Image (cartoon, rainbow, N blue to C red):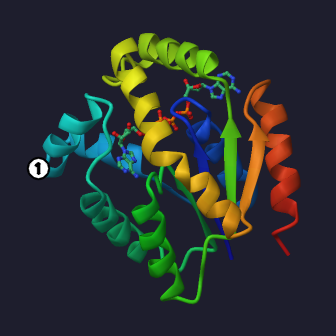
Amino acid sequence: MLNIVIFGAPGSGKGTQSELIIKEFGLEHISTGDLLRVEIKNKTELGKIAGQYIDKGQLLPDDLIIDILANVLEEKKNAKGIIFDGYPRTIPQAEALKKMLNKHNKDVNVMLNLEVEEEELINRLIARGLIQGRSDDNRETIQSRLDVYHSQTTPLVEYYTKEGKHHAIKGTGSIESIFEQIKTILAKHVG
Ligand code: B4P
């Protein structure tokens, strides 16, 4: 059982590296950002609410996102392992995740922190906005997302460091070289 939290600022490469980890280690993927984008595309009630937050670069309220996570986790409870991508983003979300996993005698095993300088993050997200047209990949919203990341999400670095699970990864360079660093860390956790 290998439960991984992939962590980093918007544009740090969480989604990109998650795909490679899943292929290599056969894990299930939970990306709260992807889940919300499907809801928005399908114009569901949840999608309408999510869109209002995402377009402003803000986080959804903890209660709402914790409920969503609990439902998805229940569906994947027999998975060999799960990669949590974009969740948790606040301390209450991390505490809720711990409780949910502990109920099944499980826990987060590793937190991978992709470290990338702000200028590079902004360049990547602007480039993605031009290619994929994501509504939150424009200069103004990117800045709000980075501000929210610094104020609400970075306390998780200390949280997982105290738990002995934090691993810093240099998130710049080629996608393959970043994945090599991740593989070296994960190799120590798979039997
Ligand atoms: P997310 O979808 O999680 O958005 P993200 O932080 O931008 O990460 P993403 O995984 O997409 O990008 P990546 O770094 O891989 O969340 C979107 C929004 O949903 C949030 O702002 C929030 O409103 C809401 N939300 C989601 N989860 C929530 C939660 N738990 N609580 C509350 N609200 C929540 O990639 C970025 C770009 O960089 C890509 O174009 C990629 O190709 C490129 N890239 C990657 N690696 C690279 C490398 N090594 N070199 C060059 N480019 C690279």
Amino acid type of disc 1? Answer: Glu
Instruction: Decide: is 21 above or below 147.
Output: below
Which residue is rendered at x = 33% and y = 65% of the image?
66
Instruction: Decide: is 114 above or below 5.
Output: above
Which residue is rendered at x = 29% and y = 35% of the image?
54
Q: Is residue 73 left or right of residue 181?
A: left
Q: Position of residue 109 (x, y in %)?
A: 69, 70
Which residue is rendered at x = 51% and y = 79% of the image?
101
Q: Which residue is mark 1?
A: 45
Instruction: Decide: is 179 above or below 90.
Output: above
Q: Is residue 183 left or right of residue 49?
A: right
Instruction: Decide: is 119 above or below 162.
Output: above
Please indicate, yes or no, whether residue 179 appears anywhere in the rendered image.
Answer: yes
Q: Is residue 177 left or right of residue 118?
A: right
The front one of 116 and 35 is 116
The front one of 66 and 153 is 153
Please indicate, yes or no, whether residue 41 appears anywhere in the rendered image.
Answer: no
Quarter holding the C terminus is: bottom right
Quarter holding the N terminus is: bottom right
The front one of 93 and 138 is 93
Q: Is residue 12 left or right of residue 166?
A: left
Q: Position of residue 57 (x, y in %)?
A: 33, 31
